[in-house]
Amino acid sequence: MWTTAAPWCAHHRIRLLVPAIFVVSVLFFFLASPRSSPSFFAVPASREHSPVRSRLIWAQRRVAEWRPCEWWRTGIPAPPTRNGYIRIYCYGGLNQLRRDLCDGIAVARLLNATMVLPKFEVAAYWNESSGFADVFDVDYFIEQTRGYVEVVKDIPEEISLKEPFHVDCRKRKGHFDYVETVLPALLEHRYISLTPAMSQRKDRYPSYAKASYCQGCYNALQLNKKVEAKAIELLEAIPKPFLSLHLRFEPDMVAYSRCEYRGLSSKSMEALEAARGQDRNVLTGDAARLWRNRGKCPLTPSETAFILQALGIPTETNIYLAAGDGLMELDGFTSVYKNMYTKSSLLAHEDFERMHGNTKAALDYYVSVNSDAYVATFFGNMDKMVTAMRTVQGLQKTLVLSRRAFANYTAAGLAEDQLAKAMWDAHREDYIMGRGSALPEHCFCELKL
């Protein structure tokens, strides 16, 4: 029997052996193939070997993205006669100014008013004077808003001889009815100045006012040629590819948050105490824990570095720091991510010193909009504008880090690899669903992929 079965066994061994050799060869090819050199868009060949840090956030397949809605791309003509002239007064830094201006464009259309070029009130913020034309292209703004709202550089002499009647709506929140409250003053005085309400509910505006807001905010504001030339010079000086990081951990901001931080350097503590003064006491006890778990406390530079690593961002990534002066504890970031660049390090010292504060902010804005990737540690006015403009240009590698997730997971006792995995999961969900941008729904529409 054995001699009879031998040829059969030998024949079937060969049949089994040939596929096995093929499978082993294929596995060897894939496992032994040489790796490409690490890059910003590749999986990092990092010192950490945990599964969490072998992934890259930008490589995740998205299931939804946002695009500018088509409905507002065509203007909705205003009535041929106007109710008067309105000038928007904008306060604060560049991105606060833009916020007020965008709101003002919608209000001008809502009230059927002719809009005079806005006035930028920046003295209290920058301790200097700069206007709309010092940053933005006036003619481009007028041309791009045509068909949505009428904008003029000057007003008739008989009207310009008197000061505009001022209406300050800054303290109004929620649904504030401009037609009911402001239109009577416009009809009476024919020329008013207006400071828009904060946190106004734009979803209740009629479609023509929403369209004017979207067009004016996202298609009509272009840097003037001088500022744009300097911004292009700065962009070209940054090694490519690069990530723009808007990191916020200045004394004023941390003091305003009323959050407690342990382990800061003595220099940072002195700056923080000076910024707190008498009116910004640190929260304690249950109030402090609740506040932090709601995501109200800014991420420190070292926490930011940890989260970037958890998201698979290689430590050799070129990073442009889009931030002002005075960041505290920056060593906690640069000790991990060493390839960091700033506008002050890349531009000539004389050029940098002569710039207005708004011009410096405009450079950060321009570089961030045109970067290969953008990450924000705080969702402020600049982050809202940058993420929106990147969406307009189809640039989707944009993410706002979750302070709430970091606070809640650390409060639960997670640390090191467990915390890294939790941060990966939280941010991956935001990124693939397109939620990291938090765009105005009346201007941007969700696109299922």
Image: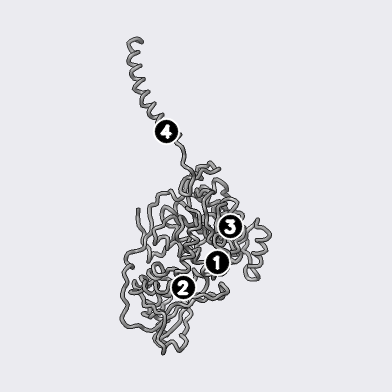
Q: Which residue is mark 1?
A: 351
Q: Which residue is mark 4?
A: 29
Which is more N-terminal, label 3 or label 1?
A: 3
Which is more N-terminal, label 4 or label 3?
A: 4
Asked whether the beta carbons under mark 1 and mark 3 sit within 8 Å of each other, the answer is: no
Task: Residue 122: give x, y in percent of width and height.
Answer: 53, 74
The answer for how far apart the CA atoms under marks 4 and 2 are is 59 Å
Tell me the element at label 4: helix
Please, what is the three-letter code of the amino acid marked with disc 2?
Answer: Asp
Q: Which residue is mark 3?
A: 300
Which is more N-terminal, label 4 or label 1?
A: 4
| Residue at position x 46%, y 89% in the image | 162
Which one is in front, 166 or 148? 148
The answer for how far apart the CA atoms under marks 3 and 4 are is 44 Å
The image quadrant that residue 141 belongs to is bottom left
The answer for how far apart the CA atoms under marks 1 and 2 are is 29 Å
Task: Residue 200: give x, y in percent of width and height.
Answer: 44, 72
Q: Which mark is residue 120?
A: none
Classify 10 Å Cα crowding around label 3: few (below 14), some (14-19), many (20 and above).
Answer: many
Classify 10 Å Cα crowding around label 4: few (below 14), some (14-19), many (20 and above).
Answer: few
Please, what is the three-letter code of the amino acid marked with disc 4?
Answer: Phe
Classify 10 Å Cα crowding around label 1: few (below 14), some (14-19), many (20 and above).
Answer: few
Q: Which quadrant, please, contains the N terminus?
A: top left
Q: Which residue is mark 2?
A: 100
Tell me the element at label 1: helix
The answer for how far apart the CA atoms under marks 2 and 3 are is 29 Å
Task: Residue 414: give x, y in percent of width and height.
Answer: 56, 49
Which is more N-terminal, label 2 or label 4?
A: 4
